[in-house]
Amino acid sequence: MATSSTNAFNLDVDQVIEEAFERCGLNSRSGYDLKSARRSLNIMLAEWANRGINLWTVELRTKTLTASTSSYTLDSDLIDILEAVLYTTSNTTTDVEVDRISRAEYLNISKKSSEGTPVQYFLQRGASTPTLYLYPTPDGAHTLKYWGLTKIQDAGNYENELEVPTRFLPCLTSGLAYYTSVKKAPERTPLLKQLYEEEWQRASEEDRPRSSFFATPERGVI
């Protein structure tokens, strides 16, 4: 028996909404139904950021630092910084780790204006744009490289495909079906919520780093 020889299956926003409505035993009959479902879809995608690190939203970014400037406004789509290094090219190219500190630790630094090579940073996660604070204040032109956790792109037009890996499509459609049922088919909400959580669990367990982790006890410590 012949196979398709393709593996490009995906769903656009309109098809995700249609699938979600069918799981609720409904048909999307009006323009308002579509508008309401797309709004729920965007709310759900925002909620996914609260469930942990979605690996496909992690991007390597850079920020050019300026001498005597200790704070920097970062991109509005940035949620958090996972790791950061200072990229230097004096003699040889090196990446030097920059440690993250808490708000209290940064506040307690007595002389924040001291200049040197930054070794610590504090990230203030604002309502719209995050602000990065460095210590010491850069004494020259440096480049900060960091792995940034970014927002998932909005649904946009109904013909768009979503910025979600295909392995998350079962979770995506189950989630929108659950969100839709809350408004239109409450009798199905418990079942659809259970299916959504099961799909999320499977997808999130698959979407994880594959590197090995080894814990070595410090010598002399029991």
Image (cartoon, helix red, strand yellow):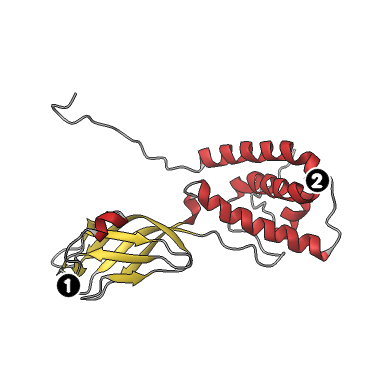
Residue 89's place in the image compared with 55, above or below, is: below
Tell me where residue 41 appears, x and y as whole percent. Answer: 66, 56
Tell me where residue 21 appears, x and y as whole percent. Answer: 79, 50
- Name the residue type under label 2: Ala
Q: Residue at x 64, y 62 (%)?
A: 155
Label 2 residue SS: loop
Counting labels gives 2
Asked whether, in this view, residue 15 is left or right of residue 58, the answer is right
Reading the image, the residue beneath label 1 is 139
Q: 109 or 138, which lies in front?
A: 109
Q: Residue at x 21, y 76 (%)?
A: 68
Which quarter of the rendering shows the N terminus?
A: top right
Asked whether, in this view, residue 33 is left or right of residue 174, the answer is right
Label placed on residue 185: 2
Asked whether, in this view, residue 194 is left or right of residue 183, the answer is left
Q: Can the viewer see residue 98 in this picture? A: no
Tell me where residue 141 appears, x and y as whole percent. Answer: 22, 74
Q: 141 or 180, which lies in front?
A: 180
